[in-house]
Image (spheres, helix red, strand yellow):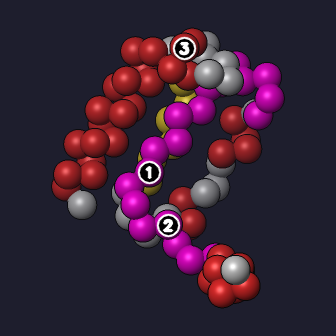
Amino acid sequence: MQKYEDQLARKPKISVPTMILHGDSDGLYRTSASEGQESLFASFYERRILEGVGHCPPKEGPRPFVKGIEDLMAAANKV
């Protein structure tokens, strides 16, 4: 277990394509919570703010949520 803790402590970059879908009406996490994370990723990374969407994007903004997933899949195919 310590081996994995040591690896994580070095903060390796995340190498899988990633998209953050953050609702601008999220009552739990302000959009500032997902700002400035680009340096943590070594592959495709995009952050999208979903207007009028709260804490549960699939339920509260299904169209922009699905669009984000489709765009992530397209980007992943290019990596």
Callout 2 touching callout 1 (CB < 8 Å): yes
Farthest front residue?
1
Q: Specify the label residue 14 is tagged with.
A: 2
For the point 69% across and 35% down, the residue is 31
Q: Is residue 39 above or below residue 12?
A: above
Q: Quick check: 10 left or right of 46?
A: right
Residue 37 horizontal/vertical position (percent): 61, 57
Q: Quick check: 75 left or right of 63?
A: left
Query: Badge 2 local density, few (<14 within 10 Å), some, or many (20+)?
Result: some
Front label number (1 vs 3)? 3
The residue tagged 1 is 18
Q: Is residue 2 visible?
A: yes
Magenta stretch: dominant secondary structure: loop
Residue 47 horizontal/vertical position (percent): 51, 43
Answer with mark 1 or mark 3, whichever residue precedes in sequence.
Answer: 1
Calculate the distance from the C-alpha at mark 1 to the C-alpha at mark 3: 20 Å
Query: Badge 1 local density, few (<14 within 10 Å), some, or many (20+)?
Result: many
Q: Secondary structure at mark 1?
A: strand
Q: Is residue 5 magenta?
A: no
Q: Is residue 8 above or below residue 22?
A: below
The part of the chain drawn in magenta is 11-29
Callout 3 touching callout 2 (CB < 8 Å): no
Q: Residue 43's image quarter?
A: bottom left
Q: Secondary structure at mark 3?
A: helix
For the point 42% across and 67% down, the residue is 15
Answer with mark 3 or mark 2, whichever residue precedes in sequence.
Answer: 2
The residue tagged 3 is 59
Residue 70 horizontal/vertical position (percent): 29, 32
Query: Badge 3 local density, few (<14 within 10 Å), some, or many (20+)?
Result: few
Three-letter code, disc 2: Ile
Q: Secondary structure at mark 2?
A: loop
